[in-house]
Image (cartoon, rainbow, N blue to C red):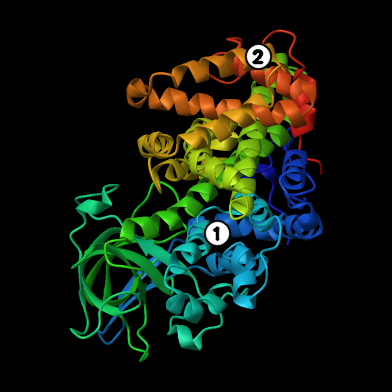
Amino acid sequence: MSRPAAAETGFETHEVFNQAPPLEDYNLFTSDRVLQESVAREGAGDAAAQLTAFGAKIGKAEVLDLGRQANTYLPVLKGFDRFGYRQDRVEFHPSYHALMEISVAQGIHASPWEHLARGEAAPAGRNAARQAALYMMCQVEPGHICPITMTNASVPALLFQPSLAEEWLPKIVSRAYDPAFGPMQAKTGLTLGMGMTEKQGGTDVRANTTQAQPASKASAGPGSEYLITGHKWFFSAPMCDAFLVLAQAPGGLSCFLMPRFLPDGTLNAIQIQRLKEKVGNRSNASSEVEFKRAHGWLIGEEGRGVRNIIEMATYTRLDCAVSSAGMMRQSLAQALHHCAHRRVFQKHLIDQPLMQNVIADMALEVEANTALAFRVTRAFDMADESEEEARYRRIMTPVAKYWNCKRAPGFAYEAMECLGGNGYVEEGVAGRLYREMPVNAIWEGSGNVMCLDVLRALAREPEALEVVLSEFDSAKGMNGHYDAALAKLKDGFSDIGTLEPRARRVVEEMAKIAAASILLKTAPGEVSETYCASRFGGESGDLYGALPLGAPLREIVERAMPVL
């Protein structure tokens, strides 16, 4: 049969050219100089080989495409089976399970706690190594990271109740992903979620109305079984095997471990009302639920629920800061790759002076935010052995969470604009990242909550501020703009009574100064000097692309370019 003429098909009208090839089949670790330097600097250099292997694995085209699939074929609530019995199950596309399997096999869900299950000493750099893998994996698909993050963060809260930790920890740290819907006793690996917020309270969890009563009058207190009645407005990842839940016990707001299945193998009374229709984070199922005398086991003492759940939130906030930096890195990589291939007005975009300014400015932002996130990660690794690092962690975790998460959405938009119309279509990754970015700022404490957390930590522990400022002082004398910004920050702390109305400004400056102190001591001069001039010296605009005249744009861009 002869081929139809071009006029009949209507397709053979032009040649496709001047399009960037897809950014795929590359190593997300070895292609990223800043990530490699951060890992080595912050104590996880020994993990470089396994991170290199992981970066190669997830940079493959077929793995990157799993992210597209998981956000195209969304989770579906199956509230009842075909006979009418409640099952409260969420069905996912196979791509979601494939992503979960990759992340669990790498240990992103719980590797910092494996030594506890084995009765060994904590290995050095365990959190930094995990965060490097998280930084890369959220570039592939960030939605599935929600249950991965919560599983890791649940462990320190669960440790407040040793009897429960002993039972659950071995399967939590297992690197075998088990998607089966069944009792924990029959599974090879477990994931955990959380349920804190209610309709009337949101961030104010002390306003919760969900009630918990001891299942037996003769038994109450730590580790005991309670019956819980109420609701949760956001119940994250409802297919997890258990959840940390807040409820009002007779002794006050308390934290409970609530499994999906009871020890006898029957379903717990967790009824899923609906799945949230979210702006982003769409591959992950978030739900609204009701508890109808659901069974939960008390973690720690009654009335200590906020203390216990905050331990979990501390770790999820670090993940928010790191994953925001990771998604910014992927947004930048897409923009760099596109501009290196696309020709406009007889020159590649990346050689156009104004575009070069934009991308160089964005590269500075990614390097600074990555440096900040991994410096805080080091404090998590060292907090148990160093009181100074524990104090640094208490102050700088909410600082990093606030700043990185706040900067991410606008950054993603700017990167999307670098791709033009190609960035504003669903086939590419740019739009998906843009929709995902806001959730990290909202989840686990909004911007105002983070700033207030910093102020509360400063009020409770003024010694922590001394630790932070001492670290900032270590870069004094290296740059005049930096020195002036640091002096101004210190002056601002002299009037504690006026801090709250200007808390956002103070926390922003703390974040930028913390990042700059690292860059001045470790990054090439063209990076650190330009960062300080643009962030502290008044030589920048409100948007990206206003770096000062004479800035070493090409050197900054070349440092950030993915090494393929």
Q: Residue at x 43, y 85 (%)?
A: 183
Circle 2 is placed at which residue position?
533
Mark carried by residue 279: none
Seen in the picture, residue 26 relative to 63 is either above or below; the reply is above
Seen in the picture, residue 531 relative to 157 is either above or below; the reply is above
Given residues 314 and 466, the one toward you in this image is 466
Q: Quadrant of the C terminus?
A: top right
The amino acid beneath tag 2 is Ala
Classify 10 Å Cα crowding around label 1: few (below 14), some (14-19), many (20 and above). Answer: some
Residue 384 on image: x %, y %: 59, 55
Question: Mark 1 or mark 2: which is in front?
Answer: 2
Question: Is tag 1's residue or tag 2's residue first in the polypeptide sequence?
Answer: 1
Tell me if residue 428 can be seen. Answer: no
Q: Residue at x 64, y 41 (%)?
A: 375
Left or right of 455? Residue 116 is right
Seen in the picture, residue 23 relative to 219 is either above or below; the reply is above
Seen in the picture, residue 521 relative to 307 is either above or below; the reply is above
Residue 228: image quadrant is: bottom left
Residue 136 on image: x %, y %: 66, 51
Mark carried by residue 69: 1
Left or right of 523? Residue 329 is left
Q: Residue at x 62, y 49 (%)?
A: 386
Residue 7 on image: x %, y %: 65, 41
Q: Quadrant of the N terminus?
A: bottom right
Q: Secondary structure at mark 2?
A: helix
